[in-house]
Amino acid sequence: MTSSVKNETNNNWLKQVYNQFIEAANKLTLAIEDGINTAITSKYNPFYYHGALPQFYLWVLFLSGLLLFAYYVPTIDNAYLSNRLINAWTSVQYITNSLPFGGVIRGIHRYSGDAMVLFIFLHAIRVWFTDRYRQYRWIQWATGVILLLMVLFIGQTGYYLVWDERSLLLTRMTVSALDALPIIGAPLKAWFLNGDTITNLTLSNFLFIHIGLSFALLFVLWLHYVRMTRPVITPPPAVNFILVAAILLIVFLVPISSGNMANLNTQPNTYDVDWFFLFNYWLMAHMPMSVFWISMTALAVGATILPWFVKTVSPPVTPAEVVINKCTGCSLCYRDCPYQAIEMVPAPAGSRFKLLATVNVPRCSSCGICVGACAFDAIDLPQLPDATVLTQIKSLAEVK
Amino acid sequence: MIKGIKDIVILILAALCLIVSLVFMPWSELNFTGNFPGWLSGVMGHFGVNKFFADLATHNKLMELVTPKDVQTNLGDYAYSLFLFVAMTASAIAIVLIGKEDDSEKTVLEAKK
Ligand code: HEM
Ligand code: SF4
Ligand code: SF4
């Protein structure tokens, strides 16, 4: 950190406290990572796959979900088969009790969801504490918040689908929460229930949201990755094994079961809270609805704008610059830049070459990788010219 | 071939993985009965494993251990997930031990040429 930046921050005690907190958190994170590195080497350190961990569980969820989907019946009742009732709850019972390994698959789906939320939080905390979420990384952060909200909602719809007493209670709580919203409340409620009241159509809607949003997640993940040239999205096999094994152990230790079948004529009043997905229902039950909505919205908006709100932990970056008459348009820098900050454009008229490298300033992290990539000395960091770096290296080598 | 303790540990883990996945997983899948497929009974007969399982099934020690509170379905299915956990963990540790070697920095020269 340069001294000029320190001086700026000194003006504001809040910023100072915040910066000290982040610096301490950063040190702690790095110390834990170092410890793990010594134990199992950096190759298997889960901290280095913090983004890949939720991504891995997403694939597990898709696969196990596909198996559940094959047997799930999204209805609350079935008038035509009323003596042999087939509905969402009985289909889930069938999956759990009669299908070979159905209960295990259901357990894998449930606990992988929980694990995904857990690792998303760790991932978000990691990038926050190591200060890797601002400036040229804002798009990853902002899409990350959207991803988190989507994942939470997908998980909640998963809990509605079981159609036990908890599902009914959660559905009713959601309806009253939506009802409390001005203007948009009524249409949202109608969309949510797929009508005025809970019917078979409601459960088809829940299934549609659950699966549709899961696929929409892939699109938002694309936005999350689009500015990173080589995002690490798969952990090494040994880590994958452990990730699956951990889920299997939990499935064995805590087998899941449904509550009683939902009955529209009764109002259940207690339920088990899954703290990964259903904490907002717990909050909803413990505060006035207006306070709930205002605080949730503030939290989401606050999290999204965090990268712009915090500005002064590390010095501002100065983007790389291309020397037009030296650049041959070879694209090496373009391929190496980790943030897709370099664009190859047609060379100006009269040039011997076809392409010219240009730097997209807001995306550049000033990392200097392109400087090393260029064989023609055609790209430089203005504050750190090649020649200076070379003399520094030489003098260091001589001292040794 | 076997150069040290590490290699022995790797072999033990590999054996554990094989035994668990070839013996314990089918056993739990068949819900702890001794009705293994013929080839497996044949293999196990050689090691006196059949008797071991017959004892287990009558004394129910393992069954008690693996009886979680509210299992609704086949207990064996859940035990299967436990054994799969053991097999995957063993193989993961083995892979980590083998993989450790690649981790050393290869671009650094020992001495100046
Ligand atoms: C579905 C959930 C998510 C998945 C699967 C996911 C996955 C990933 C992956 C694979 C990377 C690349 C990591 C690397 O190559 O080092 C990444 C980067 C990043 N993610 Fe996420 N992420 C998710 C949610 C979030 C959330 C909730 C946030 C924060 C609110 C977030 C913030 C970031 C940031 C700032 C980066 C850039 C980090 C860097 O450049 O070092 N992500 N994410
Ligand atoms: S310094 Fe070069 S490689 Fe690094 S982000 Fe900027 S343009 Fe890309
Ligand atoms: S590596 Fe150098 S010469 Fe090649 S495109 Fe980039 S700036 Fe131009």
Image (cartoon, coloured by chain):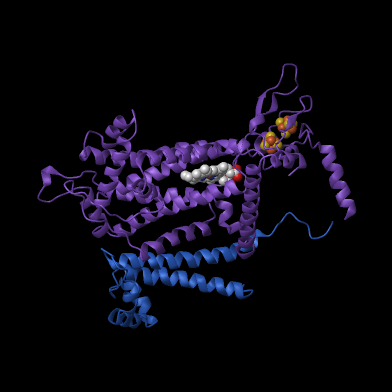
Chain colours: A purple, B blue
Horizontal and vertical percent for residue A270?
A: 28, 54
For this rendering, which residue is in front, A159 or B56?
Answer: A159
Horizontal and vertical percent for residue B39?
A: 34, 72
Horizontal and vertical percent for residue A128?
A: 58, 46
Q: How many marks?
A: 0
Query: Where, quadrant-wise, is the C terminus of chain A in this rendering?
Result: bottom right
Residue placed furthest toward the left = A83
User: Above or below — where is B60 with respect to A103?
Assistant: below
For residue A377, side relative to residue B64 (left or right): right
For this rendering, which residue is in front, B111 or A258?
Answer: A258
Question: Looking at the rendering, which quadrant does residue A111 occupy?
Answer: bottom left
For this rendering, which residue is in front, A300 or A252?
Answer: A300
Q: Is residue A225 visible?
A: no
Question: Looking at the rendering, which quadrant does residue B18 occupy?
Answer: bottom left
Horizontal and vertical percent for residue A64?
A: 36, 51
At 48% from the left edge and 47% from the top edge, which residue is drawn?
A55
User: Above or below — where is A330 with respect to A56?
Assistant: above
